[in-house]
Amino acid sequence: MIDFRRPLRARAALVALLALVLPACAESPGAAPPAGPPAAREHGDRPAAYGKAGGEARGEAKAPRPARVRAGRAPVWRHGARGAAGGKRVALTFDADMMAGQHDRADAGERFDNPGLIAALRELKVPATVFMTGTWAARYPGQARAIGRDPLFEVANHSYSHHAFATPCYGLPEVAPGTMRAEVERTFAELRRAGVPEPVPYFRFPGGCYDDAALRALAPTGVTAVQWDVSSGDAFATDPGAVAAEVLTRVRPGSVVVLHVTRSAAPVTEEAVRRIVPELRRRGYGFARVSELMATG
């Protein structure tokens, strides 16, 4: 226990020591995160690592995390800088959802992937962050590998089972007690098994639902929980114009937009994106991956 009645000189020495130690503690709440791509500067909408052939290496720098971290809890990040520091950029993020019990439906022909959407992002040259569940990567390893190795994109963690980390949560079943950390670690292992070389140390809670216990459980994994400030409403939507209008009405500089790469549950997302992207560019916006937006604050 610290005795704050010590002489002033001793207090000064203590303050100096804390000034050296505390920043290091804030930088790392738990185990070191998996390596991710650098916060590349953009030229227009394209990350610097995305060359004409689309094949240059990203480098070995780790993806940034928020500087402020509460001790013993995973940090939560919702959007980039609103002012001039971040520029007029937004991050389009896509959840690749598939629950552990849905493989029988996939066997029967239901599509939980959306290759047309990924092709559209490539055609439009839009950098994006894709949050994959472990079951999605296991079901579509070729697509997971292609997305993960394309420097236009970065791949992040969306849990293994897509069960809720806090309930109630839109009817999702609850993660089994004591398995939250395992859900995250198992997914990173599945992403690498599928051939994703550098999944970034970001995690999106299924349904966006979490509580303090969930943040404490995830702290040892070293992930940052990435939320959003613009919900596209594309899940189960049938009108791409309505989805586009929702995004275009709510977006601001630094926004993080959540969409989906699950064709059966979000069938109009590709068409909505084809409307959203040119209109935002007409308004002067550029696009960034989460790691690039996070690097600005």
Image (cartoon, rainbow, N blue to C red):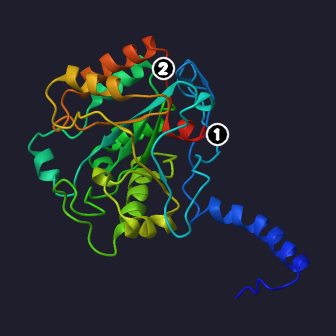
- Quarter of the image with the N terminus in it: bottom right
| Crowd around label 1: few <14 · some 14–19 · many ≥20 (10 Å) | few
| Crowd around label 2: few <14 · some 14–19 · many ≥20 (10 Å) | some
Q: Position of residue 199 (x, y in %)?
A: 48, 48
**Residue reaching furthest top?**
282
Reading the image, the residue beneath label 2 is 285
Near-viewer residue (195 or 70): 70
User: Vertically, is 265 above or below 170?
Assistant: above
Q: Position of residue 200 (x, y in %)?
A: 50, 48
Q: Position of residue 37 (x, y in %)?
A: 58, 41
Near-viewer residue (213 or 116): 213
Q: Are marks 1 and 2 in contact (CB under 8 Å)?
A: no
Label 1, label 2: how far apart the Cα atoms are: 26 Å
User: Vertically, is 297 above or below 34?
Assistant: above
Element at label 1 = loop
Amino acid residing under circle 2: Tyr
Q: Position of residue 211 (x, y in %)?
A: 36, 64
- Horizontal arrangement in the rendering, residue 36 relative to residue 269 (left or right): right
- Horizontal arrangement in the rendering, residue 174 relative to residue 198 (left or right): left
Residue at horizontal 52 percent and vertical 32 percent from the top: 151
Amino acid residing under circle 1: Gly
Near-viewer residue (297 or 201): 297
Element at label 2 = loop
Q: Disc 1 or disc 2, which is closer to the eye?
A: 2
- Horizontal arrangement in the rendering, residue 87 relative to residue 110 (left or right): right
